[in-house]
Amino acid sequence: MKKTILAIESSCDETSVSIVENGKTEICTIVNSQIDIHSNYGGVVPEIASRKHVENITIVIDNCLKKSGYTMDMIDMIAVTYGPGLIGSLLIGVEAAKSLAFIYKKPLIPVHHIKGHIYASNLSNDLKFPLIALVVSGGHSELVYMKSDYLFEKIGGTLDDAVGEAYDKVARVCKLDYPGGPVIDKLSLLGKDTYNLPIPLDDDSFNFSFSGLKSAVINLVNNEKQRGNEIRINDLCCSFQNRAVHILVKKTIKAAKKYKVSNIVLAGGVAANKQLRKTLFEKCDLYNYNLFIPKIEHCTDNAAMIGAAAFAAYKKGIYADLSLNAKSTVNLYKEFNND
Ligand code: KG4
Ligand code: ZN
């Protein structure tokens, strides 16, 4: 039987609401981004983000219902990102979802943000298991092994900065716009790999470390400035991006070999990166792996991906009651009830 889910995502600086059927059909998604506000500060300011979510949440819910032509009696379940993320931001989405579930007497499904990013691919393709997912965003750089549907095992992650965070900080020191990822992605195509930067954490683990690479760029910029040398921004972007993409792709392919999977998922905001997509695609082609990448609009934070994951959670019987609380950090591989 068809299940229609109204999903809410508010873990960072996007207030998003979506209506998704059976985890596959996106009826309508509204994303209200606060990027213009936070770009004035060069990064997300948590207090401002939560205040904006309070202002936006009911308007975005109303807009989604109006635009879709759906009414609350056509909705079977409410889903919400309960973590990880900025606690003040998460709370707004969780309280809104609980209110809807209470008033309209609908079941409530809690969704882990990373699980949402992985299931974003299910909106345009049918995910195949077992798989390895590389989840890369402003807050995460993780390798996840999934043996079967909605069964997660984190096999590695960043020991310090997330890769998107490194992109944003490198952009800041180069005086480029926020968020840095899309800008560096564009400029690096115009440059050459001429700067000598380290390959970050090139070891046998499935962990990442981007703070050393980020610091190497910051030191290089400061040293060149002191010497009065001009910095070739396009070349620096290209050199930085080459190192980041190289290590992400290398460890993902190594994980696929070790876990004997032939399906790879690329997810999260940094999955919008052209070079990462191209390099991973070429490697997957070489080794005959299926590569799943969400549509660009499903890479950055959105509620459609939460609706997609929620349907898989529903099939596993994962529900929350009205005591559901937001959590800034959440274990990925434990089922919700065991958190
Ligand atoms: O998933 P997302 O919207 O939010 C988080 O959960 O963090 O990801 C945002 C991050 C930012 O750090 C942004 O710079 C990065 O994704 N990003 C990119 C690109 N587009 C967005 N990084 C590299 N290349 C891109 N094209
Ligand atoms: Zn995200």
Image (cartoon, rainbow, N blue to C red):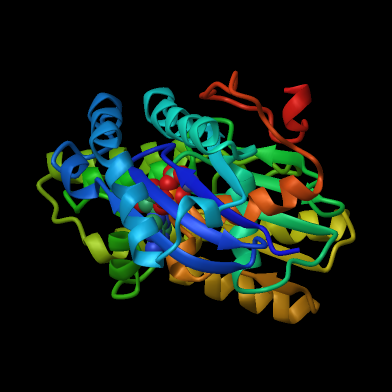
> Seen from this angle, which residue lies furthest top?
323
Quarter-wise, where is residue 183 in the image?
A: bottom left
> Seen from this angle, which residue lies furthest right?
260
**Which residue appears at 67% of the width and 58% of the height?**
3
Quadrant where the C terminus sits is top right
Number of residue marks: 0
Can residue 47 be seen here? The reply is: yes
Q: Position of residue 190 (x, y in %)?
A: 29, 75
Q: In this view, does 17 lie to the left or right of 101?
A: left
Q: Position of residue 120 (x, y in %)?
A: 58, 60
Quadrant where the N terminus sits is bottom right
Viewer-nearest residue: 209 or 314: 314
**Which residue appears at 41% of the width and 66% of the height?**
68
Can residue 251 be seen here? The reply is: no
Q: Position of residue 222 (x, y in %)?
A: 21, 39
Viewer-nearest residue: 301 or 23: 23
**Which residue appears at 53% of the width and 41% of the height?**
140
Viewer-nearest residue: 287 or 55: 55
Q: Where is residue 34 in the image (x, y as percent from the top left)?
A: 24, 45
Q: In this view, does 17 lie above or below 20?
A: above
Quarter-wise, where is residue 230 in the image?
A: bottom left
> Seen from this angle, which residue lies furthest left?
228
Q: Is residue 30 left or right of residue 281?
A: left
**Which residue appears at 55% of the width and 21% of the height?**
325
Q: In this view, does 20 lie above or below 73?
A: below
